[in-house]
Amino acid sequence: MQRWYRCCGEVRGRLWLLPIATLYFLALSVAPVMLHPQCLDFKPPFQSQRELAFCVMYKEFGCCDYEKDQQLMAKYYQIMDNFDYYGYANCAGFVLELICQECSPYAAHLFDAEDPHTPVRTIPGLCPDYCSQYWKKCRDTIPLLSDHPHIAKVKEDQTNLCWYLELGDMDYCYPHLLSKQKLTQNLGRVQSDSDGCLQLCLEEVANGLRNPLAMVHANDGTHRFFVAEQVGLVWTYLPDRSKMEKPFLNITKAVLTSSWEGDERGFLGLTFHPQYKYNRKLYVYYSVEVGSDERIRISEFLVSSNDMNVVDHTSERVILEIDEPASNHNGGQLLFADDGYLYIFTGDGGMAGDPFGKYGNAQNKSALLGKVLRIDVDDNEKGPLYRIPPDNPFIHEQGARPEIYAYGVRNMWRCSVDRGDPHTKQGKGRIICGDVGQNKFEEIDIIEKGRNYGWRAKEGFSCYDKKLCANSSLDDVLPIYVYPHKMGKSVTGGYVYRGCEYPNLNGMYIFGDFMSGRLMSLQEDTNTGQWKYNEICMGMGMTCTFPGLINNYHQYIISFAEDEAGELYFMSTGVPSATSPSGVVYKVVDPSRRAPPRQCHYDPLPVRVKSNLIKFVPQETLISIEPPRKNEDVPQPTVSTDWLRELIDSLDEVGPGPTTPLPTTTTPRTPRHSRRKGRRRKGKPRVQGAPELQNGAVRLVGDEQGRSDHGRVEIYIDGEWGTVCDDLWTIKNAAVVCQQLGFRYALKAAKNSEFGEGKDLQILLDDVQCDGTESSLLNCKHSGVGSHNCVHYEDAGVICGNSNYVVEV
């Protein structure tokens, strides 16, 4: 099953070809990966709502609110009341600084609390020079600061005390860490790698779902959330993430779908009426078969008057049905906008290129397909099931369907209403959609009344039907963002983040791609109206080492969601089939900054539960993270084999001849500098006694800086070397390669020929799907040796590493 990691960790050093003595010295010069801000409650730092009065050095950003600041000040005065003027003059500054490190944004690091299972220090980790000064001037304060028995035992011995108060990584003790520019220059901002990819984390919320394609809330104060599966089941979850055993809605017998991977039919959307709390109404969008015809159906249901967690299935009223000429492009979004009307987003009818009629369905205003529809479903208990809003744009146009609000859309998959900036209300009410492209581009649109979104005349910014595109009456509105199929082939629209918990994300439109598994973001410049793009990666190294957080997800991103408080989620699956229980709901988390404690507190209204509850059990885990602990042996980089390899490599550069890997206990590794043709030459190898290459052996080539842990993946099968070409290359696949080459971790799954194209070789593997534990890529699922549907610009690569430690030169 494929997992998606999308991470681009920074390698903080380069290992060049050096004399053995120098390399040995460097092997001892190990520096830890970049620290991450974390408080003693194992959560990110924040800015206090009320300015701190005591630990003012951390008033802008840290781990204390005003209440905690006052507690620390009381502790300070309690200690200093034990000293005379001389003691006060000498020690007040030391005591204040030591006490206030609980407010440091790196408090968890300073107090050895990054691992919740280890005891927290009573005095922060001190640098030796600072500790020496403190001990000489103020050692009498030690018993007042700490009651730790070992500190009491060694407090009169400067050497032993300062050794005990040291941290494992000396450069990051107090106060030296304050002078580390890398730690302070972007403190409190969303972190990004060298490519600008934003480093976020995830929290698992629900699992075991079959193609979860919608998650909604009822806006009734209960903070329940409802997750819909493609087969036609909707499940109720409580705020503690426990799940009702009895489904909220079950229309599996009516829903038309199948177990085929990629089947677009099924239960596709639901939304609650804005006045649900009073009228108990909700609306669903699903595929049905009527006779030999396939249709999309929009129905109204009522929640049972006897059980708030179950729909009254006898209450269904069909609001609208539309014939579907093909089984794909079924649309599926339902939402209520700020105007109180129900918006329905239909697909263009399917097949390819909207081939229906002279101009296609999307440009035909007498058809309901390829449209954004807007209807009024209020007060429909008697009379028509829906009415036409009086300001619908085409209500007076002859031949046009009055339900149409906008047209020229291909297959909008997931739209959302912007709640607006919490303070300025900027953006409030905007409807933003992802419209799936044909064969070149995916686009993001802001929906405006009466506008034409261009399909099939245009795909993204480019012409698709050149004749229609040249029509001066097209008057289409352009997308706010377009990306090519090299980045992804099926956009999944998302949400503008307006939640409370992660203020850095405010105003960021977060969306994804179903096929490539790519998470993306857009941020509007309110001065220019332009949208800035940033890719989103999963946090590397220590970034996501908070309790309950993970840094990987299943590849196929199906949908996004908001909860009642405005926090952001997405749903993805490892197998895109309506019957595969591999779907997971993830919450998006910014590990760099949180809201102040208690600012985002809410009290859910009670839920009367009549069903059994299934307790939530997380299944996902953090990948490749082992934070070092004090007094443990620090793992050293595995470089001994590389010394010999690099000497062989340097000798190899002197004269001609093929290069043969050295025998090792792992699969042989190719010299890092090799750019020769990858086919194995005939004849005896130059290094006698080397084993014959086995099927599945891999090597890394193509890194411009000659690094042995970076490169394009080439695999040896049936007597020849070839490339692995896969636009869905994942961190799990990379892990198999790195472990095969003797590395402990895969730091990055490189795609799109990041390390060059292996044009001289055949493409031997495509569509590789590994669990990460296989001994070779050949043991993973793949399309078959030599069978592929890609080209060399999609050649896959990896960046490997031995631990969270790197060698710095």
Image (cartoon, rainbow, N blue to C red):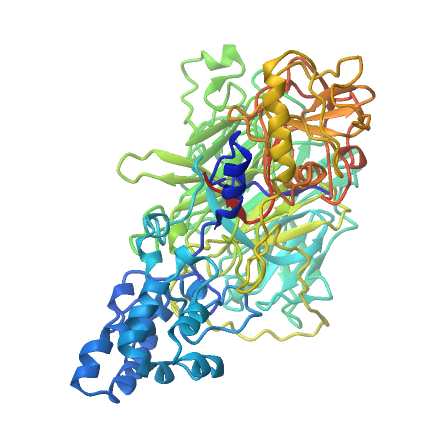
Looking at the picture, tell me which residue is in the foreground, 273 or 85: 85
For the question of whether residue 539 can be seen, the reply is no
Residue 217, quarter of picture: bottom right
Looking at the picture, tell me which residue is in the foreground, 572 or 290: 572
Across and down, in percent, residue 430 comes to: 40, 43
Residue 59, quarter of picture: bottom left
- Please give left or right for residue 115 compared with residue 733 in the image: left
Q: Relative to 171, is 611 above or below?
A: below
Across and down, in percent, residue 702 comes to: 58, 23
Which quadrant does the N terminus fall into? top right
Q: How many marks do you count on the picture?
A: 0
Name the residue: 41% across, 52% down: 419
Name the residue: 55% across, 58% down: 628
Q: Relative to 35, is 738 above or below?
A: above
Which quadrant does the C terminus fall into? top left
For the question of whether residue 783 can be seen, the reply is yes
Q: Relative to 585, is 133 above or below?
A: below
- Please give left or right for residue 721 compared with residue 388 in the image: right
- Please give left or right for residue 329 compared with residue 200 in the image: right
Residue 67, quarter of picture: bottom left
Across and down, in percent, residue 631 comes to: 55, 65
Q: Relative to 574, is 380 above or below?
A: below
Across and down, in percent, residue 506 comes to: 38, 51
Looking at the picture, tell me which residue is in the foreground, 674 or 403: 674
